[in-house]
Image: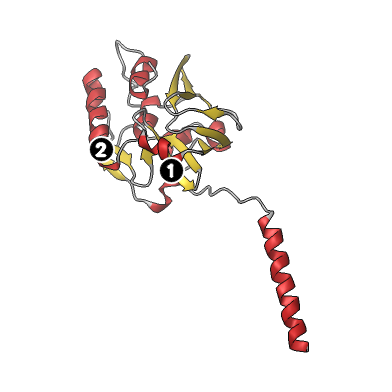
Amino acid sequence: MTVLLVLVMFLIFVVADYIVSRGKAPKLALAPALKESTPTILDGFKVTENVRYHPGHAWCQRERKHLARVGVDEFAAALVGPVEKIDLPKTGQWIRQGQKAWAFSRNGEKVDMVSPIEGEVIEINPDVIKDPTLLRKDPYGTGWLMMVHVPDEENTGRNLLPAGLVKSWLRSAVEKLYAAQPQLAGATAADGGLPVDDVTAGLSGQSWRELASDFFLTR
């Protein structure tokens, strides 16, 4: 009888714990995007295999079903350079894939970027708002921009770059950058060939906004 009573009490505790746990909202996984992948240096810029890239130089990483983290690649971060302000969508706002979603401001100019996915913004990164230098220091990690609820993951994925084309796509972007501004070809640090903090510091004949907009597909 005692054993039966103990078993009944144990079952009651298990059921109660399940009911309580089911009612709790799941916590967002906010680990840096590079946690599970070592980046590769390609023509001076970091790329990583655990994110999906959009032709407009934004990336997204699937955190779990219907939830994605969004940011910009290192090429974009180097191109925007030392921005003074980052304007992100409000939480609850719906953003569309391929349409303008956020903007960077610098020296009186403003450049937009398009979203790599479609969905509802459920969280923004307050740290990158307070300290825009995080975007350049760690674009795949602490410099992430927002978390988005993505209802239609299948259709969204079709408009992102296939993994096998990422390297050739980035190489083309780097070649285009240096062709437009030949003086930038030497604007890499001696240590590892990584780009300097501001690859457009020596621009002449073209504004920062015009150059960035060409690559971000917003011109």
> Which quadrant holds residue 113?
top left
Q: Nearer the viewer, residue 28 or 75?
A: 28
Q: Nearer the viewer, residue 43 or 16?
A: 16
Q: Residue at the location (48% across, 41% down)?
A: 69
Measure the alpha-carbon separation of dots 1 and 2. Answer: 17 Å
Quadrant (top left/top right/bottom left/bottom right) for the C terminus: top left
Disc 2 packing (10 Å; few <14; some 14–19; many ≥20): few
Q: Earlier in the sequence, mark 1 or mark 2?
A: 1
Q: Which mark is residue 205?
A: none
Quadrant (top left/top right/bottom left/bottom right) for the N terminus: bottom right
Q: Say which element carries label 1.
A: strand
Q: Would you place residue 47 above or below residue 29 in this image?
A: above
Q: Nearer the viewer, residue 144 or 56?
A: 56
Looking at the image, the residue that sits furthest to the bottom is: 1
Q: Position of residue 153 (x, y in %)?
A: 45, 40
Q: Residue at the location (61% across, 32% down)?
A: 92
Q: Residue at the location (70% across, 65% down)?
A: 17
Name the amino acid type tagged 1: Gln
Residue topped by disc 2? 165
Name the amino acid type tagged 2: Leu
Q: Position of residue 21 (x, y in %)?
A: 67, 59
Residue topped by disc 1? 61
Number of marks present in the image shown: 2
Q: Would residue 110 be found to the left or right of residue 162 on screen? A: right
Q: Would you place residue 3 above or below residue 101 in this image?
A: below
Looking at the image, the residue that sits furthest to the top is: 205
Q: Say which element carries label 2.
A: helix
Q: Nearer the viewer, residue 16 or 136?
A: 16
Q: Position of residue 218 (x, y in %)?
A: 39, 19
Q: Would residue 87 be found to the left or right of residue 20 on screen? A: left
Q: Residue at the location (75% across, 82% down)?
A: 6
